[in-house]
Image (cartoon, rainbow, N blue to C red):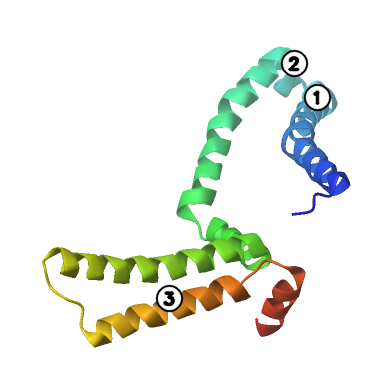
Amino acid sequence: MSKNYFFRAWFYFRTGWSTYFAFIFAAINTLTVTYFLAIEQYPILHSIFPSFIIYVLIIASISIPILVLIGYAHYKRSSAFKAEADVYIEANPHMRRILSNTEMLLKLFDEITISTVKLSEGKKLNDDEINKLINIKKELSKYIKDNTISPKNYDDDKKEN
């Protein structure tokens, strides 16, 4: 696997920026702007929030639980996260390969388990069962040979969809 250090660094930078720095910066900016441009200008609001620190504490105590519930709903109660995960798997050749590998392995494990149980009971495999295992072996060998996560295969998969 070739490593492109520039794009890896770019990815890490964007992740750090969007997940941590931009989030914290946006929260501080929003609190500062709303307090000093809105709260201080209206006496009734200023009486509720007499200082910036009190404003931050009250807003944080209300908004953090609400945002936690919204995040929970996003992941557990809406179909939005499922759609995001579907897009991620469709667009990422590594994830699609893992999914394909899992499907192939489950089929293989099922047949191996059936055969192992039968053999452990002292029974012999009949010709159909042996042929089925041989066919799975051939299918697995072809799968290993043909399935890669190269850009060529990725582009071919995109054309099929």
| Residue closest to the eye, 161 or 46 | 161
Residue 83 visible somewhere in the drawing: no
Whichever of labels 1 and 2 marks the residue nearer the N terminus, that label is: 1
Residue 5, image x, y percentages:
85, 44
Q: Is disc 1 surrounded by few (<14), some (14 to 19) or many (20+) residues within 10 Å? A: some
- Label 3: which secondary element: helix
Residue 15, image x, y percentages:
75, 41
Q: Which mark is residue 52?
A: 2
Q: Which mark is residue 17?
A: none
| Residue closest to the eye, 129 or 99 | 129
Quadrant for the C terminus in the image = bottom right
Instruction: Tell me whether circle 1 and circle 2 mark residues in contact (CB < 8 Å).
Output: yes
Residue type at tag 2: Phe
Q: Where is mark 3, residue-wise?
A: 137
- Rounded to the nearest whole Å, what is the CA distance between mark 1 and mark 3? 65 Å
Report how many numbered discs are placed on residues in the image: 3
- Rounded to the nearest whole Å, what is the CA distance between mark 2 and mark 3? 69 Å
Q: Residue at x 46, y 50 (%)?
A: 76
Image depth: mark 2 or mark 3 in front: 3
Residue 126, image x, y percentages:
20, 83
Q: Is residue 110 left or right of residue 42?
A: left
Residue at the far bottom: name it.
Answer: 128
Image depth: mark 1 or mark 3 in front: 3
- Label 2: which secondary element: helix
Q: Is residue 110 left or right of residue 155?
A: left
Q: Is disc 3 surrounded by few (<14), some (14 to 19) or many (20+) residues within 10 Å? A: few
Whichever of labels 1 and 3 marks the residue nearer the N terminus, that label is: 1
Q: Where is mark 1, residue-wise?
A: 32
Q: Residue at x 61, y 59 (%)?
A: 84
